[in-house]
Image (cartoon, rainbow, N blue to C red):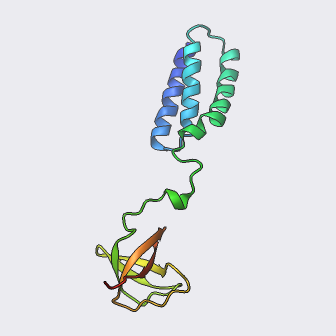
Amino acid sequence: MSAWIFFLILALIFFIIEIYTPTMFFLNFAIAASFCGFLGIFTDNYNILIPLFAILSILFLLFLRPFFNINPKKNKEHSFESPYIGKQATALTNITAFTGRIKIYDEDWEARLASEDAEEIKQGAKVNIIRHNDLTMYVEKKEKK
């Protein structure tokens, strides 16, 4: 089998693996195999192409992967945009700094006070959602106008 066909098939396999595991890991190997496939047109010497594939794969992993990651340096807490922040909800239970539940959009969520020194919110009170961290909403009592 010609070297260029071998490396293009290898690149196709890595592209397909990347489609099913979107980690931006196998894409580096696919790009390296594509380069070796292109160079395989000019030479069939596997003693050159296989080490070149290994070197290119390592270089692409080191230098291209940070560019492929969408937000590699962004803090998780700041990158999560919640559609609930600023919305009003109803306290299903009493809400303290350690326990509580709220209801918003017919959904039941775990809730905590946004400030640990804030006064406990009673069941049935209206609250504003201040922060959303994983499965917990941080709330404060809605001010009456």
User: Image quarter for residue 41?
Assistant: top right
Residue 82 in picture, x, y percent from top left:
41, 63
Q: Residue at x 40, y 68 (%)?
A: 85
Q: Nearer the viewer, residue 44 or 127?
A: 127
Q: Is residue 110 left or right of residue 74?
A: left
Residue 114 sits above or below residue 15 on the image: below
Numbered disc total:
0
User: Is residue 33 visible from the viewing direction of this image?
Assistant: yes
Q: Is residue 104 left or right of residue 28?
A: left
Q: Residue at x 49, y 38 (%)?
A: 17
User: Is residue 1 visible from the viewing direction of this image?
Assistant: no
Residue 102 sits above or below residue 38 on the image: below
Residue 124 in picture, x, y percent from top left:
33, 89
User: Image quarter for residue 144?
Assistant: bottom left
Residue 111 in picture, x, y percent from top left:
45, 79
Residue 39 in picture, x, y percent from top left:
59, 13
Quadrant containing the N terminus is: top right
Q: Residue furthest left?
A: 106
Q: Residue furthest front?
A: 145
Q: Nearer the viewer, residue 10 or 61?
A: 61
Q: Residue at x 38, y 70 (%)?
A: 86
Residue 116 sits above or below residue 80 on the image: below
Quadrant containing the C terminus is: bottom left
Q: Nearer the viewer, residue 85 or 144?
A: 144
Q: Residue at x 59, y 34 (%)?
A: 64
